[in-house]
Image (cartoon, rainbow, N blue to C red):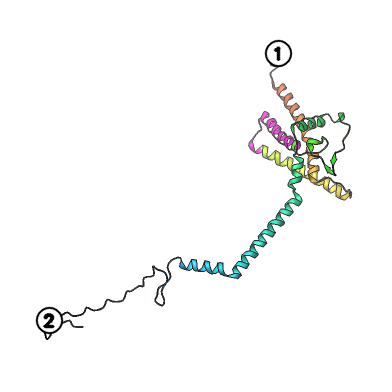
């Protein structure tokens, strides 16, 4: 296109009109969707649009509600099965002890021949907790006696120069396996003999765990005798 200048009739100089600007190569999409056909949305606009559609979709809401109900039902089933085998309320009953009960129970375990009445006491057909009934079984004393047994075993091995940290874990796991095998044998015997009893697994654990009190007393005696025999002859004669 040629550009030229000319003077009109009245001698005025006419300016030529400039050529129009070329169209942009890319559309400005910073304000959202482009007004032109084929424009691209702003970054993040498609995500917000899909989320709004998902929240407003009744099928999606129904699926979310159904998934929530299934999760709650599964949680209830898990809690029910857990309480079936391990009831927290029953477990609290076996740990309802106090200092007076522990002292009296230890004396009863060491000197059982001094006790006459071995019947458990009930209140409205519900057994009294151990702190109110000396004959009621508990799991506090067996647990503490078991831990003491493992520590005494580690001490005995240390005196014999055979102690290592792995020995404590091995001793504890072996003792636990034997306790569980004993309880399973008792349950199997009750089942085969068709004996109907109100004894639960916790009762059997408590009664089978009381033997560790005797084990601890024997271990303390052996430790005392070993320490006494390990002293030099001069120190033993001087001490006597």
Query: Is residue 18 rendered magenta in the image?
Result: no
Name which of mark 2 and mark 1 comes first in the sequence. 2
CB under 8 Å between discs 2 and 1: no
The residue mark sitting in front, 2 or 1, is: 2
Q: Position of residue 108 (x, y in %)?
A: 82, 31
Q: Position of residue 182 (x, y in %)?
A: 80, 43
Please give left or right for residue 50 compared with residue 15 in the image.
Answer: right
Q: Position of residue 93 (x, y in %)?
A: 76, 42
Q: Residue at x 71, y 32 (%)?
A: 152
Q: 145 or 88, which is in the foreground? A: 88
Kindly tell me whether residue 126 is visible in this rendering: yes
Q: Which residue is mark 2?
A: 12
The extreme left residue here reads 11
Q: Which residues are magenta?
A: 141-166
Rate crowding at label 2 as few (under 14), some (14 to 19) or many (20 or more) other CA atoms within 10 Å. few
Q: Is residue 97 above or below residue 40?
A: above
Q: Name the secondary structure under disc 2.
A: loop
Q: Is residue 122 above or below residue 12?
A: above
């Amino acid at each position: 296109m040629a550009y030229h200048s000319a003077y009109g009739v009245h001698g005025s100089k006419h300016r030529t009109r400039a050529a129009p600007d070329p169209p942009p190569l890319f559309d400005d999409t910073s304000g959202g969707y482009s007004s032109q056909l084929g424009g691209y949305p702003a970054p993040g606009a498609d995500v917000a649009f899909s989320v709004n559609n998902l929240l407003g979709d009744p099928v999606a809401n129904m699926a979310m509600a159904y998934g929530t109900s299934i999760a709650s039902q599964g949680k209830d089933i898990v809690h029910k099965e857990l309480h079936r085998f391990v009831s927290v309320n029953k477990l609290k009953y076996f740990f309802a002890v106090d200092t007076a009960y522990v002292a009296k129970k230890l004396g009863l375990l060491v000197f059982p021949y001094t006790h006459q009445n071995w019947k458990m006491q009930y209140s409205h057909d519900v057994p009294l907790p151990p702190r109110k009934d000396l004959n009621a079984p508990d799991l506090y004393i067996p647990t503490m006696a078991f831990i003491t047994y493992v520590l005494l075993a580690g001490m005995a091995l240390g005196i014999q120069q055979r102690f290592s940290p792995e020995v404590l874990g091995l001793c504890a796991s072996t003792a636990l396996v034997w306790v569980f095998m004993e309880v399973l044998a008792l349950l199997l015997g009750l089942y085969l003999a068709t004996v109907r009893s109100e004894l639960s697994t916790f009762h059997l654990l408590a009664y089978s765990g009381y033997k560790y009190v005797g084990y601890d007393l024997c271990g303390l005696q052996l430790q005392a005798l070993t320490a006494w025999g390990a002293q030099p002859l001069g120190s033993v004669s001087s001490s006597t």
